[in-house]
Image: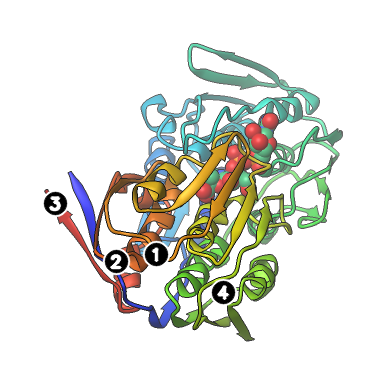
Amino acid sequence: MEKLVIKGGTPLKGEVTISGAKNAAVAILPAALLINGKCTIENLPNISDVKLSCEILSKLGAKIEWIDNNTITIDTTNVCEHQAPIGLTSKFRASYYLIGSLLGRCKKAEVGSPGGCNLGSRPIDQHIKGFEALGATVKVSNGKIKASADKLVGTSIYLDMVSVGATINVMLASVLAEGTTIIDNAAKEPHIVDVANFLNTMGADIRGAGTDVIKVNGVKELKGGATYSVVPDQIEAGTFMLAAVASKGDILIKNCITKHLECLTAKIIEIGGNVEEDGDTLHVWCNKRPQKANIKTLPYPGFPTDLQPQMGVALSIANGTSIINESIWESRFQYTNELNKMGAKITAQGKTAIFEGVEKLYGAPVYATDLRAGAALIIAGIIAEGTTELYNLSHIDRGYENIEDKFRNLGADITRVNE
Ligand code: EPZ
């Protein structure tokens, strides 16, 4: 079993370059199935969810060539299979995008129920609502989702709640539909805009992505033939910003879109950190103990739920008592049990957690409970006194490219060990 051994106490210093966004890449790759041709995708993060997505696309008949660790050409001309391999699709959440893209391309799809981080029940009723509104019949049984349609006809869809996945999935299913689709109450995350930009580069006609009303004018075909570069990862950048603050460090975060991090920047300044923007680089530093703050996670542009555990680490050592309200997921405080093993004083109850700031954390053996909890526990190990052993690294490797190398280059004493 692999583990990360982290010897704490070093403030992070230096610079780090942000990779392409996981949550954009895992949607753009299945979106390529809508193309009848070839395209090139650059700035893909070198993570297991991307490799898994490519493996599934190949099994569906796509021809994928790796140009380097972060660039592929993909030819989907000969894709004729509509049944995604169930053993693979259950390994991550984003497999549900195969339903929208296969439905859009083949008018039928058979995909295993998605897996992904255990954050509570993760229903897909809004995805299904969208597919049915477009004219599809959807059945969920025996761990599979089967969708089919004689034809897909554009319509207006009002999502009952703001959902990243449902917004993207309905967009995928409507790109080749007859007529115009309006997605109302749409999510506005940067990765949704990135998927729309990718599809438009390949010949789609999508307007309004990034607002709460997205308009999709159906087109006959996506010819592809272009090159697209995945947007920088807002959540990876935020992870390093919070690592700089919690470790009382001073780092330059390169290749990020500072606008995507405005909410976190405001909160970091509120707790006593410093942030300076310079083009696509953020300079983040902090030379004192963070102050307490209250956080409520919200859909973009609110405070991102995917940065909640990382912020929790900074608040666990803050001066005073903080409250985090997790409004998106029912069960996203499992990481606090691990932090309490390191000396934190956190009481989590349902969607709320109270952080009584302590002077310091102490190294201990801890377990990543999901992707972002794993990243948070790396930060905790870096700031703790003594040695931390972090297990369940497969969660972390799903979403962060070379994370221990990036932290080591910032001065962290961190090693991946096979035990
Ligand atoms: C995406 O998940 C991300 N995953 C998650 O990131 C992220 O936490 C989440 O968006 C919110 O930003 C990917 O993009 C692969 P939602 P998704 O649909 O699409 C409820 C990470 O760490 N809902 O926006 O599954 C749902 O239960 C991961 O990178 C329904 O009720 O999230 C939740 O309470 C973790 N019915 C809320 O909406 C539906 O049909 C938001 O979920 C869909 C969602």
Q: Name the residue under label 3.
A: 418
Q: Name the residue under label 2.
A: 385
Mark 3 and mark 1 in contact (Cβ < 8 Å)?
Answer: no
The percent coordinates of residue 3 (x first, y second) are: 22, 51
Q: Where 327 sits versus 207, above or below?
A: above
Q: Tell which tag, 1 or 4, sits nearer the viewer.
A: 1
Distance, label 1 to label 4, CA atoms, is 30 Å
Q: Name the residue under label 1.
A: 360
Mark 4 crowdedness (10 Å alpha carbons): few <14, some 14-19, many ≥20: many
Q: Which badge, 1 or 4, is on the more N-terminal residue?
A: 4
Distance, label 2 to label 4, CA atoms, is 31 Å
363 vs 196, left or right, is left
Q: Tell which tag, 2 or 3, sits nearer the viewer.
A: 2
Under circle 1, the secondary element is: loop
Q: Which badge, 2 or 3, is on the more N-terminal residue?
A: 2
Q: Residue at x 42, y 60 (%)?
A: 72
Q: Name the residue under label 4.
A: 256
Q: Residue at x 51, y 27 (%)?
A: 82
Distance, label 1 to label 3, CA atoms, is 28 Å
311 vs 69, left or right, is right
Q: Which badge, 1 or 3, is on the more N-terminal residue?
A: 1
Name the amino acid type tagged 3. Answer: Asn
In this rendering, does residue 268 appear at all? yes
